[in-house]
Image: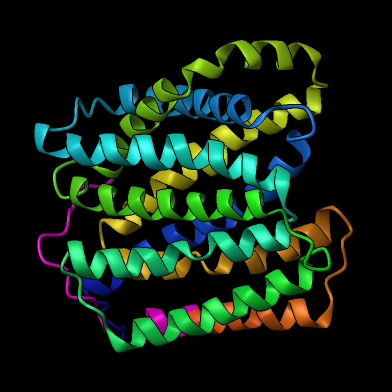
Amino acid sequence: MEQIIAPETRADRRALLAAGITVVLWASAFVAIRSAAQYFSPGALALGRLLAGSVVLGVIWLARREGLPPRAAWPGILGSGLLWFGLYMVVLNWGEQEVDAGTAAMVVNVGPMLIALLGGWLLKEGFPPRLLAGMAVSFAGAVVVGISMSDGGRASIVGVLLCLLAAVTYAGGVVCQKPALKHASALQVTTFGCFVGTAACLPFAGPLVTEIAAAPLPATLNVVYLGVFPTALAFTTWAYALARTTAGKMGATTYVVPALVVLMAWAVLGEVPGWLTLAGGLLCLAGVAVSRGGGKAREPGNVTSTT
C-alpha cells in the first residue's frame, strides 16, 4: 500500500533540505575566506562578496517578477541587511584575521544561543526544553572543536571581541529577518537585505578596486564564489527554511557548520583533524538532532510563498 505523506511533513522536509544546503555552503565559506583574506581587507572582502551576491539575487528577482516587498517587511529587511549582511560580514572577516579558525568558530557559535533567547523573548517562540538541551550539547561540541583547533590558547583579545560582536550581529539579523518573512517571500527578503548590506559597505569601494587589481585571479574568484553560493544561494535557502520553523531551531541547525569546516579543511587543505576535533563535531551533530526533534514547531502565521 502506498504511504500517504502529509503536506506538513513534505514542507518540513523541504525546509530541512534548505537548511542543509545553507549550512554546507556557509561551512565552505570559511575555506574560501581563509584563502581570499590574504589579499583582501575585511571591508573590501565583504563588499566584493555582497556585490556578487546582489547581482545574482537581482537577476533572479527580476526574472521571477516578485516586485517590491510590502511595507510591513521593510523594518526587518533593513535590520537584517545592516546587521547581518553588512556589519556581520565585515566584523567576522576582521576577527578571523586576529584569531585562529578554531577560536573564531567557538566564539561565533554563541550566536545560536542568542537567537534562541531573543526568539523566545521577542518573537514569543518560547523556550522548548528539547531545543535548549540540544543547543547545550551542540555548544559543548563547538567548544571542543574550538579548543582542539586553537593555537595553544594564544588568541587575540581584540579578535575574540570582534567574533563575539559578529555573533551578536548575526543573532540580531536573524531575529529581525523572521518577522519580515511573514509579509514577503524568502527571495524578496534575502535580495533586499543583500542590497541594504551592499549599500552599507560602499565606503569600502576604493580599497576593493585597489585590492582586486593587485590580487591573483584565484583570490578574486573566491570572492565571487562567496557572493554567489554562501551568500545569494545559502541566504535564500536559509530564509526559506526560517519562514517555516522557529528562529531558535534554525539557529541550532548552524551548529553543524564547525564540524563541516573541519571535514572540508581536511579534504581541501589537507588539515587532518585530531580525535578531539572529531569528537566535538559528533557532539555538534548530536545536539542538532536533539534540537530538531520532538514534533512540529508551533508556528502561527507561517509564510507559504516560495522562492
Above or below for 277 versus 20 = below
Above or below for 284 versus 34 = below
Query: On the rendered structure, is 145 left or right of 76?
Result: right
| Residue 79 lies within the magenta run | no
The main secondary structure of the magenta stretch is: loop
Identify which residue, 114 or 217, lies in the foreground.
Answer: 114
Whether residue 293 is visible? no
Residue 269 percent coordinates (x, y): 85, 53
Residue 56 percent coordinates (x, y): 47, 27
* Quadrant placement of the N terminus: bottom left
Query: On the rendered structure, is 237 left or right of 306?
Result: right
Residue found at the very far front of the displayed protein: 157
* Quadrant placement of the C terminus: top left
Report the colour scheme. Answer: rainbow
Residue name at image x 53 percent, y 69 percent:
255
Highlighted magenta segment, given as a residue range: 288-307
| Residue 296 lies within the magenta run | yes
Residue 256 percent coordinates (x, y): 56, 69
Identify which residue, 180 or 102, lies in the foreground.
Answer: 102
Residue name at image x 43 percent, y 66 percent:
112
Identify which residue, 19 or 128, lies in the foreground.
Answer: 128
Above or below for 198 versus 102 = above
Above or below for 155 versus 63 = below
Query: On the rendered structure, is 54 left or right of 44?
Result: left
Residue name at image x 47 percent, y 23 percent:
201
Q: Quadrant of residue 196?
A: top left
Residue 79 percent coordinates (x, y): 28, 39
